[in-house]
Amino acid sequence: IGRSTLAGSVEIATSPTCEVITSLGEAIGRCCQFQGGGNPTVVLPEGLHVVDEAPLELCSDLTIIIDGYLKFTNDESLFPILPPLPSYGIGRDVPSNFTFHPLIRGEGVKNVVLKGMGTVDGSGLPWWVKHFAGNMSVSRPPLMEFLYSDGVSIEDLVIKDSPFWTIHPYASSNIRINNITVQNPPVAPNTDGVDVDSCTNVTITNSQFYVGDDGISIKSGLNGAGRDFDMPSSNVHIENITVHPLIDNLSTNGISIGSEMSGGVRNVTVRNLDIRGCEAGIY
């Protein structure tokens, strides 16, 4: 598999033939159509890369290496509207039947890797302002969400300024998160670091969370919808984690079980925590 330079901004490892691709979304689309075997790879080198298009939809057997600064648009008109998750039945941010498409999303994918020495910036400030003003009629989007997926790895990245929950694996298995740093201001509402939601076989290690809500939260749906969905979070291993909001915002917990856990939580192991300035270490 060769590597082609794309318009001086991204590279794509798909074939020896150079292809000129001007957007990250198009590069991912080409990778998802690639039939040459192996795992095609999109590489964002150092520098600023602005996603001013629709949010990113990922596919199976895809690697994205982010070594630059990836900044997302906050233009709501570019975000598709989705129904609420079945284990909730309503949006989590506002009690509506709709939620905005996550900035990065994979549904039913396998063997996806996001890694690199760069930064992913969710441009959350306008979303937070609208939330505090009571002007949201559709629930805010997570920065990253993987649904019904198997084998997702997120490592080495700085992830910041999420509009809502930062990393949200949902009804998925074999999730590995290692050596990431999540940075959301302490006043940024509901900006948990990782929300493990009805997932099994999850490992979160060697990571730092400076966030506006819980560092790591383990969930499994809300009330009757969660009980009907009936998928617990299980086999979750958390180790070598720092949670330290810049100020005590009376909301942040280090590791939280729930509050939405109507489907159950089983077999959680937590080791070697450094929790500072939080309401509770484990809640």
Image: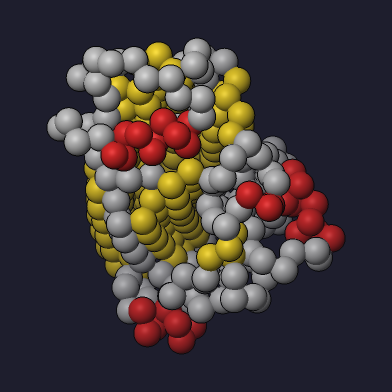
Percent from the top left, x then y, of residue 126? 76, 47
Identify the image quadrant of residue 233.
bottom left
Report the coloring of the rendering: secondary structure
Percent from the top left, x then y, of residue 117? 45, 21
Seen at 38% across and 44% down, the residue is 58
Looking at the picture, tell me which residue is in the foreground, 140 or 243: 140
Seen at 33% across and 79% down, the residue is 230
Is residue 268 depicted above or below 229 in this figure? above
Is residue 223 depicted above or below 213 in this figure? below
Residue 53 left/right relative to 144 = right
Residue 117 left/right relative to 109 = right
Seen at 30% across and 57% down, the residue is 108
Can residue 214 be seen here? The reply is no
Image quarter hosting the N terminus: top left
Is residue 91 depicted above or below 15 in this figure? below
Looking at the picture, tell me which residue is in the foreground, 17 or 266: 17
Residue 81 left/right relative to 241 = right
Can residue 201 be seen here? The reply is yes
Seen at 42% across and 79% down, the residue is 226
Percent from the top left, x then y, of residue 123? 67, 39
Percent from the top left, x then y, of residue 217? 48, 57
